[in-house]
Image (tube, helix red, strand yellow):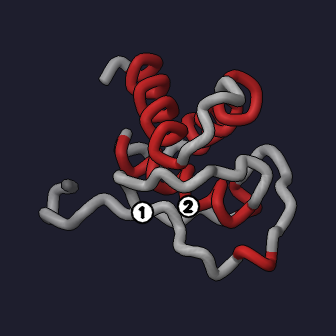
Amino acid sequence: MNEQNEPFALEIKPSDLFYRYRRNKEERDEADFLGKPDPRPFDRNDLYQVLSMLEAVMVAIESRDGDVLHRVEEIMVQELPIFVCSREDVYDCLVAAMRGELGH
């Protein structure tokens, strides 16, 4: 919560991202990741799924910093093991990694 007792909200645009992702228009209308539980598979190459995941992670760690966003994205693309594949597991791993790096 911020000083005005409003929930922390954030919108990430494709231009905010370091990497480029394909736009899977067939699944665009599929529900975004809104939090746990969500055992559905996560497609780390689909722009729409990536945007909702990164927004959720940034809200969880309460950061609007572009450098932090790029670090979360780097972890997702380069460091997150491929066997971490459900939306909730990807979310948990990214939040834990960033809290560790940020000292939360």
Q: Quadrant of residue 77?
A: top right
- Mark 1 neighbour class, 10 Å CA radius: few under 14, some 14 to 19, many 20 or more: few
Which secondary structure lies at badge 2? helix
Residue 43: x and y in percent read 71, 52
Task: Examine the rendered structure and indicate whether residue 12 appears above or below residue 37.
Answer: below
Q: Label 2 amino acid?
A: Ser
- Answer with the quarter of the image where residue 13 lies: bottom right
Quarter occupied by residue 70: top right
Residue 35 appears left or right of 32:
left
Position of 94 relative to 7 (above/below):
above
Are the residues tagged 2 and 1 within 8 Å (C-beta)?
A: yes
Quadrant where the image shows the N terminus: bottom left
Q: Which residue is mark 1?
A: 34
Nearest to N terminus: mark 2 or mark 1: 1
Quarter of the C terminus within the rendering:
top left
Residue at left 47%, top 27%?
A: 98
Q: Find residue 24 and report its horizontal and vertical position in percent.
A: 81, 69
The 10 Å Cα crowd at callout 2, few under 14, some 14 to 19, many 20 or more, is: some
Answer with left or right where residue 52 lies relative to residue 79.
Answer: left
Q: Secondary structure at mark 1?
A: loop
Which amino acid lies under the numbered mark 1 shown in the image of this protein? Leu
Residue 3: x %, y % from top left: 16, 56
Kindly identify the residue that appears in the image at 82 percent across and 68 percent down.
Answer: 23
Q: Which residue is mark 2?
A: 52
Query: What separation in Å lies between label 2 and label 1 (alpha carbons)?
Result: 7 Å
**Residue under the image location 37 percent in, 39 percent down:** 61
Q: x and y percent of residue 16 in the render?
A: 69, 55
